[in-house]
Amino acid sequence: MIQGGDNAVSAPDPTGETLPFGHRLVQAMDARGSLCVGIDAHAALLRAWGLSDDLKGLAKFADLCVEAFADILPVAKPQSAFFERFGSAGIAILERTVHDLREGGAMVILDVKRGDIGSTMTAYADAYLNPASPLAVDAITVSPFLGIGSLQPAFDVAGEHGGGVFALALTSNPEGADIQHATRAHGTSIAQYVLDEVGHRNNGAQPLGSFGAVVGATTGDAIDVDFSVLNGPFLVPGIGVQGGTADDVQRIFGDTMTAVLPTLSREVLSSGPDVDALRGAAERRVEQFAFLRGR
């Protein structure tokens, strides 16, 4: 158990076995509520915080986010691209940020949306889901549109080390519908195929499988899909600026809403750079989604 506050949550131990991601995620949400804040250091936000759009500004931004969120949130979600754009030094800041968030007690989902085949996918999985890696996190996002089977190395490495994987299923960008709403030969949608295949890998998991799906709050009911097959967590963007609401989450996910992890970025980060204001914004959103934990 990492002692990052009164409600610190467990995190993987590189020297030994750990509980599966799904189990740890339930513990984290029970302790700290249902909210994931995206750590998205895009140039406009750095400027809005009075920071320079360079390594110095990125490092300050990341440090403020760690100070604000690590000991109160169940999950934080750094967007890898905003660190990668500064090259190897930016990746070093990402490594430090991931480490500090987890030391503070938050779980970390790295938003990388990787998707490849064979040894390349295995290398991605080792980079992010093997505790021996300097960039090891609790879970990653992946793109399933080379076929769910192409992601098997990620499922395997995650399963071996107690990590998690979130496959894109119904994303909040409008272009996603062109592929995700398309139907396969036997009539089911691509989105349902993703949910079915990921859910199959969660069979029998309790209290929740470690393999999840990304489903936007603005698109989750755009087509008829069966969310009950997943038996895993839903990472749900599209809330706030993109138009989704807490009511949408409740309507779309129904009996599966206890598995929902709402993710927000701008709606919380716009309160920065003041740490107290950031914490307050996050705490208000946790309260907004308290119904997900039956509170």
Image (cartoon, rainbow, N blue to C red):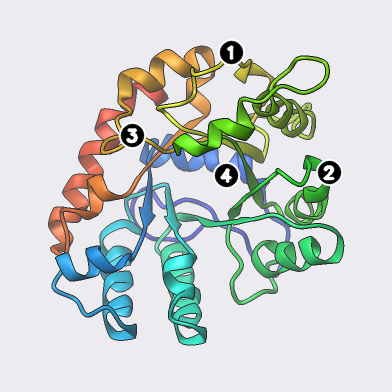
Look at the picture and state if 110 lies above or below 193.
Answer: below
Q: Secondary structure at mark 1?
A: loop
In which quadrant will I find the C terminus?
top left
The residue drawn where x is 13% and y is 63% is 274
Mark 2 or 1, nearer chain start: 2
Is residue 139 left or right of 150 when viewed as pictured? left
Q: Is residue 172 visible?
A: no
Label 2 amino acid?
Gly
In the image, residue 83 sits, relative to residue 30, either above or below, namely below
Can you tell which quarter of the image residue 90 is in? bottom left
Numbered disc 3: secondary structure: loop
Sequence-wise, which precedes: disc 1 or disc 4?
4
Q: Which residue is mark 4?
A: 24
Picture residue at 32% right of the left edge, 18% below the top: 247
Q: Give the mark, 3 or 2, whose residue is nearer the N terminus.
A: 2
Instruction: Calculate the distance from the C-alpha at mark 2 to the C-alpha at mark 1.
Output: 24 Å
Q: Which mark is residue 224?
A: 1
Name which of mark 3 and mark 4 comes first in the sequence: 4
Residue 79 spot, x, y in % from top left = 45, 60
Q: Is residue 105 left or right of residue 115?
A: left
Would residue 81 appear left or right of 268 to someone viewing this image? Answer: right
